[in-house]
Amino acid sequence: MTQPSIPDLIARLVAMNGGSAQQAAVRLGTTAASLSRWKTGKARPRPQLLERLRTLVDGSGDLIDMAEKPKSDGRLERLEEAVSGTIHALREEFHRTASVSSRQEVLDLVAALFFAHVTSIDAGARGIGEHLRTAGKTDAATLNAFMSDALSNYLPQRNGEGDQGGRLALERFFSPFSETDEWFAGQLLRLFERDAHAFRVLHEVGRDDLINEVFSRFMSTSFVDEKEMGQYLTPPEITRFMVEAGFHALTPEARSRLLNPDLSDDVGVILDPSCGVGSFLAETTRFAHGLMRDRFETAAVNKWLQRFVEQHVVGIDKSDRMLRLAMINLGLFGAKAANLKLANALAKRGAESEFSKSLEGKVELILTNPPFGASFSGDDLKGFAMGNDRARADSEVLFLERYIDWLAPGGIVASVVPDSILVNRNAFADLRSWLYDRCSVDAVFSLPPVTFGATGTQTKTSVLILRKDRRSVVNGVTYFGEAREVGFDVVTRSGQRRRIRTERSDLPTLLTEYKDRNKTKMGRCKPLDEAADRWDATFHIGLPDNISALVDHPATEFIKVSDVAVLVDDRTDPRRQGWTDFEYVEISDVDTRIGVVGSKRVAAAEAPSRARKLIREGDVLVSTVRPERGSIGVTPARLDRAICSTGFAVLRCKGIHPLALVWLLKTNLVRHQVIRNNIGIAYPAISESACLDLVLPIARNDLPAFSASAEKLWKAQEQFEAAQRAFLDEVNGLDCAATGAAPELRQVPNLVEGCEPSAITNVA
């Protein structure tokens, strides 16, 4: 069938847009005047615009729109897969035949080659491929010449390093191939030639941002075993979510300033002060570029893009290598300069601090994932409010303080934070108080442990969104959301951790609720009081409605643990008591099936550091580490004055049988409360004092009868154990008589280990 003519396509496009040539032109990414010239035959659209015109009119939809749902367009999905396949094939070829071998060298060279290839195509050439071969010239020499030319022409001229802010030396991006690399150079030409069509088509239909996205995703997932400078690169799913949430949090005036084709010098900047490979900066540029492309003509958008990247996107990192990769990442947008600075963003003194000081009060939006766990002390703490009267402070604490310094009034910070920032006490509580005095907490999104699982950590993290203005809380409430699924799982294959993309993600729903706080199902909007001990979403989302009705507004007949028990903390050190050995109770010694505590005999000289709590008969031991497992038991008479781990809260009962309290603490009502009160970034735990506030599913008037039932069960268990012990004595006697062995030991069941026998000293 004959394809429609260009005039016919334009007429149909105008009709699809309500007869408005201006609206049709904006949709296509051109001007109404250009449409008129094309319709009369006085000119023809460029190939990429013609492709998009045909797609808009005859295709199943706009490629730009389809990119948001790649599975809806097989062609676009195949193109993306081809680009991704080229990158990964390059990496594999490096490992097979190149003279470089380390992961860092491989990633650096792949990045340089990819950048040179894409920017060459953007400039109208054909990129890397077999077409570059010329008679009398080796493949290595051919590739060296191409790389030198591409990097010289297309790398941003400024990256903020050094006194002059000049460009990093080209040899730091690419080391020329030698004669011994001839075979490898030939393979590279072949690999790029294989999928060159995909690169060119994506460029022609205006999807350079998709190429950049594939590259960013590749870099984010290539740092599995490279925790350089304590950084864990943020997964692209989280990066995209944070960028969109951050832009939404901006005031309409701030968004308007940033998304204005005529960007002025006084517009604030978007900053990542620990930018790594530039994932947040690149994603911000892609997202903002998409918004601009939907609103303005192509020429205006291109002008905006150059200025946006060159002047209003700022990154700082103290790793030379990370900065080089960030420079390539931003360079893929075609910018002639990149506002990147090689420095320690936390420096407050000396020449290294000058750049970060120049940003104070000028930043509209901070999007970042700071290094966790690095410790600062001494002079490094001078000038920090969180350093006053402290010997040390963690990097994430200091970064949060600096964010507020950098923000302009009303500015937004969206940061990944370890949950210790939100729930822990001491310095972390002081930080929350300091932040509360200067900011409103706009939102807190809890992330699952799998988020950074590919890097080998299960650290519990959240996304914290702050606004530098105490008076501008949206409707006086904070949005709390909890993501249980984020679009990928992490599996281990052949000893390597890999991210597997899935269709399951709570992030889109959370983002929708955050934007429209009147329709919340997964999350919850509530005021965050100044006296709030915790800021984490898990706690503030709260409990199911039926549980919340009992716990947050308990009826008068329900009691708390504090009504029937006290918290005791009698301490001793077995190594200093002159004991030879002692009975030690740790969490694995609690039989969760019957609520009874066991023990093991430990030499005093080998006492674990956690063996410190002195317990008495009838004490109820509650595991405070992963308490949702229900490791709760009663101390039997034989363990009176034994030692238990500090991982237990020790409750001494008053007016209730200990076994009754054990089983009440195992109920679903209590379990929901325990999960809500969990704290900790590696292992969920509950504070000992929180145990006293747990509401029990029983009224005071019902206690006597329930305790009597528990007493009967306790006596029955004792009778069972006595009968079992006597029976095993008989078995032991028969065995000794048959073998002639002396009956020095007898076997008693170890209830904790599934009734496997264990030997203990015979007692009368």
Image (tube, rainbow, N blue to C red):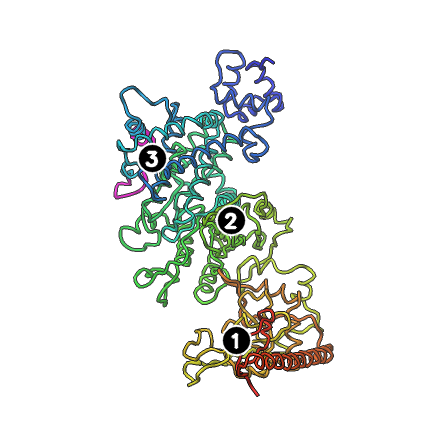
In this rendering, the answer to whether 424 lies above or below 243 is below
Q: Secondary structure of the magenta portion, mostly?
A: loop
**Type of the residue with mark 2:** Val
What amino acid is labelled 3 in the image? Answer: Pro
Q: Does the magenta stretch include residue 159?
A: yes
Horizontally, residue 568 falls left or right of residue 655, namely left
Where is 233 relative to 152, above or below?
below
Earlier sequence position, callout 1 versus callout 2: 2
Q: Position of residue 740 (x, y in %)?
A: 54, 81
Q: What stretch is highlighted in magenta?
A: 148-165
**Residue picked out by circle 2:** 491
Q: What element carries label 3?
A: loop
Label 2 element class: strand
- Rendered residue at 32%/32% (across/down): 151
Q: Is residue 241 left or right of residue 229?
A: right
| Camera-nearest residue between 530 and 233 | 233
Whether residues under marks 3 and 1 lie with C-beta atoms below 8 angstroms apart, the answer is no
Q: Name the residue under label 1.
A: 585
Q: Name the residue under label 3.
A: 156
Q: Is residue 310 visible?
A: no
Question: Seen in the image, is 8 located left or right of residue 226?
Answer: right
As displayed, is residue 727 above or below residue 125?
below
